[in-house]
Image (tube, rainbow, N blue to C red):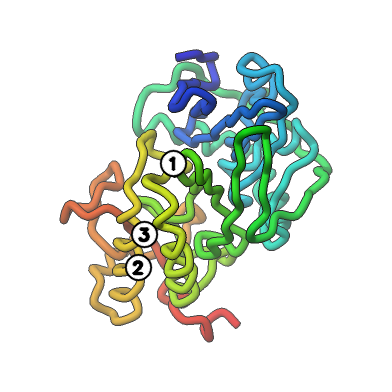
Amino acid sequence: MYESKFFKARKIYDNVTLITGLGGEQAFLLEGSEKALLIDGLSGVGSLKAFVRELTELPVTLVNTHGHVDHIGADFEYKEVYLAPDDIWLMYAHSDMEMRLGFAKSGAMFAPLPTEPKLSDVTVPGPVKTLPIKDGDIFDLGGVKLEAIAVPGHTRGTVVFLDRDRRVVYSGDACNRNTLVYGEESASIEEFKESLLRFKKFQPAFDGLWGGHGGALEQPEIIDSAITLCDEIMAGTDDAVEAVGFTGKACWYAKEKDQYYRRLDGGTANIAYSKERIWRKDIQ
């Protein structure tokens, strides 16, 4: 374990480091023989770029799985990022320093923070050179290759990264135990199910998913769990537990959960959705 007051890092494979920010958000540093790939930029509280430089001397390429507040913070340090075009506007919309500081402070809900972050600790937003990611793109690090797979749902521009040799996917927030699919940046539940069915076709190529939160490797069956929930939501047979989303807007959880976002019925995936955004026709 290597850590600073803002970040913690631990090896999950010989060439892969999991980095966690104050809000519990996760990034992954993958090293090849020629270059390194940083998957996601956390919330931008503390200098992730400086922290990463302590971990590798290789040139670093930054990619975002999507444009949310807890994934784009280092974009403003690196000033260049690979990001799906559909999420570029979202990156800038979530660049607000107070918003990103608030996310980091939210980590205190789960464990005491090692430091009390201040606004002066937040990376200052500015212009970023955005390089488009498209489905099927390959990032070759030298002996390590990552394949981009588009999984629109959580956001329109959500992308995951498959390492076929390692048999693992770095999945961001595409499909997890608290998948948020209720914002204006999200797809409909109908479209999300279509994305998951396509994602499932890659399932023979991987044995686990490292997501943007949670600290543990998820099993591929979480995709099937999420597909089932989409069907229940569309059929109106889910639990439909009303909640307040991060934006203060009402949303509904497909299954009842505890304060740590664990399903009470013991299932894996959960989806928070808007009743106004279930069908494709609702948002066109």
Question: What residue occupies the far left of the structure in this picture?
Answer: 265
Placement of the N terminus among the 4 image quadrants: top left
| Towards the viewer: 66 or 136 | 136
In what element is the residue under mark 3?
helix
Instruction: State the image quarter where residue 44 is shown.
Output: top right
* CA–CA distance in space, label 2 to label 1: 19 Å
Real-space Cα distance between discs 3 and 2? 6 Å
Label 1, secondary structure: give it: strand
Q: Do the residues labelled 2 and 1 touch (CB within 8 Å)?
A: no
Crowdedness of circle 2 by 10 Å Cα count: few (<14), some, many (20+)? many
Q: Mark 1 points at which residue?
A: 210
Q: Quadrant of residue 42?
A: top right
Spatial separation of the CA atoms under disc 1 and disc 3? 13 Å
Disc sitting over residue 227 in the figure? 2
Three-letter code for the amino acid on which mark 3 is drawn: Ile
Q: Name the residue under label 3.
A: 223
The numbered mark at residue 92 is none
Residue 38 x/y as whole percent: 63, 34
Q: Give 60 or 226, whichever is nearer the viewer.
A: 60
Question: In x, y percent, where is residue 71?
Answer: 59, 42
Q: Residue at x 56, y 41 (%)?
A: 70
Which one is nearer the viewer's eye here, 78 or 220? 220
Circle 1 residues within 10 Å: few <14, some 14–19, many ≥20: many
Q: In this view, does 243 lie above or below 96?
A: below
Marked residue nearer the N-terminal end (2 or 1): 1
Instruction: Give the residue type at disc 1.
Output: Trp
Q: In this view, does 257 lie above or below 47?
A: below
Indicate the quadrant where residue 227 lies: bottom left
Seen at 38% across and 45% down, the residue is 208
